Amino acid sequence: MRLNGKISIITGAANGIGKATALKFAAEGATVIVCDLNLEAVAGVVEEIRAAGGKAEGHVVNVTNRQQIADMVAAVKEKHGRIDTLVNNAGIVADARLQKMTDEQFDRVIDINLKGVYNCARAVVDILVEQGSGVIVNASSVVGLYGNFGQTNYAATKFGVIGFTKTWAKELGPKGVRVNAVCPGFIATNILNSMPEKVIAAMEERVALRRLGKPEEIANVYAFLASDESSYINGAAIEVSGSISM
Ligand code: NAD
């Protein structure tokens, strides 16, 4: 129970990596604040955690909506008096080559994957600093290390998230708050649905372990980074990709 008693906000927690992270955190003893776009989906994850004996609460939070974020943070602070972890997991893709990309595709991905991470961190930072403790973990990607064909917008956000991570690690480390990023490779979730099967097969070939990752394999790393076991890791961008060559 490495996360016993830790109040942990997870965005985009209704599906994929976020959901696996919510289940893992609850299994490790955290009280999980399950945030996502859809009330029913959020309630489903809360239900699953409670049925397994864990603690969870659900909030509808669109990470582009600063009022929804502020209301959720205020409610958590009011009820629990503290926040220990923010996992900035929510993210989308809207792929196109540079020559085909629309402004709408570009802006949508920047708003959610980059500004959404900023919005949520901005909303909790004063609380963490006042406590003198806390952990922020940000979802980057191998695409944020190496770039990727067709992902101008997504790559920019995931490189940007590493920029946030290193900057906040410097600003907040002296105040007792750690900030790290995880860079997953290709993980079997809905986000890959828009990728043609032959592209996914080619990706698997480029992974030394010759397979896609599982959401739980990323959740395990989030749990480690949220726990005191990683107490000297700050400002890191940890690749979890089975060793991929892009
Ligand atoms: P997913 O599509 O399975 O889940 C994403 C979740 O985010 C969904 O529940 C969705 O409703 C939620 N979401 C989308 N927009 C939101 C918004 N505006 N506000 C709040 N929630 C929102 O995707 P996933 O694969 O689990 O991805 C999770 C994170 O991991 C993303 O940031 C993604 O970029 C990153 N990532 C995924 C992979 C992969 O291969 N699956 C690889 C590298 C990084």
Image (cartoon, rainbow, N blue to C red):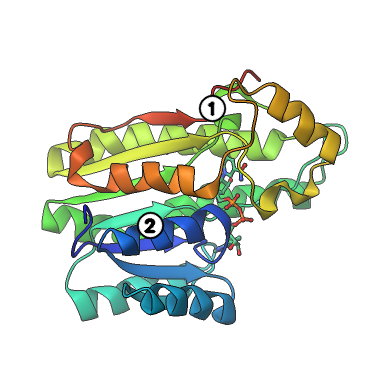
Q: For the residue labelled by badge 2, is the local secondary structure a helix, a strand or a loop?
A: helix
Name the mark on residue 242.
Answer: 1
Residue 220 quadrant: top left
Q: Distance between the residues labelled 2 and 1?
A: 20 Å
Residue 158 quadrant: top right
Name the mark on residue 177.
Answer: none
Structural crowding at the residue carrying mark 2, measured as other residues with C-alpha within 10 Å and reported as few (<14), some (14–19) or many (≥20): many
Amino acid carrying label 1: it is Gly
Q: For the residue labelled by badge 1, is the local secondary structure a helix, a strand or a loop?
A: loop
Q: Which residue is drawn at 46% across and 43% down?
A: 218
> Where is mark 2, residue-wise?
24
Q: Earlier in the sequence, mark 2 or mark 1?
A: 2
Amino acid carrying label 2: it is Lys
Does residue 53 appear anywhere in the picture?
Answer: yes
Q: Position of residue 142 (x, y in %)?
A: 56, 30
Foreground residue among 20 and 64: 20
**Quadrant in which the C terminus appears:** top right
Query: For this view, does 123 lie left or right of residue 143?
Result: left
Foreground residue among 112 and 30: 30
